[in-house]
Amino acid sequence: MNMWKGAIEDAMQKIKQNIVKHPGKLPHITEGQQYEWGENNDWIEGFYVGMMWLAYEYGQDPFYKEAAESYLANFKDRLDRHVALDHHDIGFLYSLSAVAQWRVTGSDTARAVALQAADTLLARWRPHMEIIQAWGQADDPENGGRIIIDCLLNLPLLFWAHEQTGDAKYYDVAMKHALQSQKFLVRGDGSSYHTFYFDVNNGQAIRGGTHQGYQDGSTWTRGQAWGIYGFALAYRYTKHEAFLDTAKHLARYFIRHMAADAVVYWDFDVPVEESTPRDSSASAIAACGLLELLELIEDRDPDRLLFEDALHRSMKALVEHYSTMDLPDAEGLLKHGSYHVRGDRAPDDYMIWGDYFYLEALVRLEQGIKGYWYEV
């Protein structure tokens, strides 16, 4: 059994174990090397359902399909009641639940839920700034004019809605937000801001900053990883060459600053000591971004060998040294993920998004199965 296959089999066993042990519940980030199982009221629940769909596609075991489908009504109800949806992470929630179900099964019900989710995300569009507001209400004094780099992974929901309906509003909003993200979140050396502020009154750019990074001018590694994958996906949908160039630029920076074991610390600029937290989830996201880039670039591209080497070194390190393959009762798949180090929230634990992207990278390496960000 090769390395990837063994890691996938372990992941599938743990997903099944979690489904059986926590029926109808969804994982929330806590501490103590376990998840807190509860209701659908955070930004992260889609990752768990997405893992079920990946497991089903990989092994065709209907157990995972039935489990994933059982959550659709819950996600629909959350939309209808607008429960904790004053944020941009609608794509994370619904691309990996409703869109995934539609892609795999062709469900009309799932398609309708996904389109409703796209409209919910569209309501966060602020035309005078040409941004999708990240957090809070439009009149929020702190966040009214704020974008974050994570939102690039929410844009595929809008691009998908455009493909489904032919309505240009979805495409236009996603495209304009991606352009603003490229212009203001990406720095000249290929590093990135986590967040950027605009004046809510006149729409003018104010400054870059961070929420979860080390400091305002540093490069939060998970944000950098979102940028790699997000701009690659934006290129896939739009064929705007500058998005591909930006994804490659961010990837080169990420690779140059990886730790010696090919898994990153939580911020590229934080002073490294023995106790400095890693973020295995950032490395898993970046691996998916590199896989996407390797499919998009030409064989003769000068970055191909660099990307291939970094991908395999990083994934090998995750499997051999960061996975829970040696812990059969673990709820998570990857150790040493970090959520919000500066805020002292789960600085070294399981991250459900890390688990999802780790599994997405594994099944893509092993069987060519991709995530649910675009039509295969």
Image (spheres, helix red, strand yellow):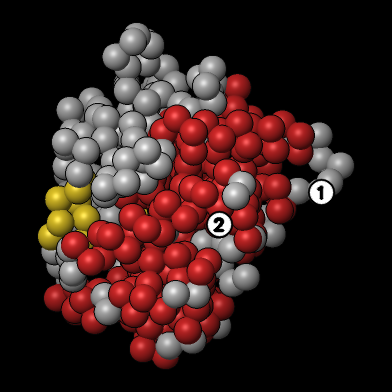
Q: Nearer the viewer, residue 162 or 256?
A: 256
What residue sits 59% from the left and 63% below the top? Answer: 369
**Residue 199 image position (x, y, % from top left):** 31, 42
What residue sits 20% from the left and 44% below the top? Answer: 34
**Residue 230 image position (x, y, % from top left):** 52, 50
Quarter in which the C terminus is drawn? bottom right
Q: How many numbered badges does the structure rendering display? A: 2
Residue 208 visible to an observer of this rendering: no
Q: Amino acid at mark 2?
A: Val
Q: Earlier in the sequence, mark 2 or mark 1?
A: 1
What residue sits 69% from the left and 59% below the top? Answer: 239
**How crowded is the residue under tag 2: few (<14 C-alpha within 10 Å), some, or many (20+)?**
many
Q: Nearer the viewer, residue 326 or 265?
A: 326
- Residue 290, quarter of picture: top right
Q: Nearer the viewer, residue 261 or 273?
A: 261
Q: Amino acid at mark 1?
A: Glu
**Residue 60 image position (x, y, % from top left):** 50, 75
Which labelled disc corresponds to residue 363?
A: 2
Residue 49 visible to an observer of this rendering: yes
Instruction: Check disc 1 and report its element: helix, strand or loop.
Output: loop
Which labelled disc corresponds to residue 298?
A: 1
Q: Nearer the viewer, mark 2 or mark 1?
A: 2
As drawn, 155 above or below 167: above
Can you name the residue that lies furthest to the front here? Answer: 1
As drawn, 65 above or below 352: below
What residue sits 54% from the left and 26% below the top? Answer: 262
- Residue 364, quarter of picture: bottom right
Taking the image as shown, residue 329 lies to the left or right of residue 160, namely left
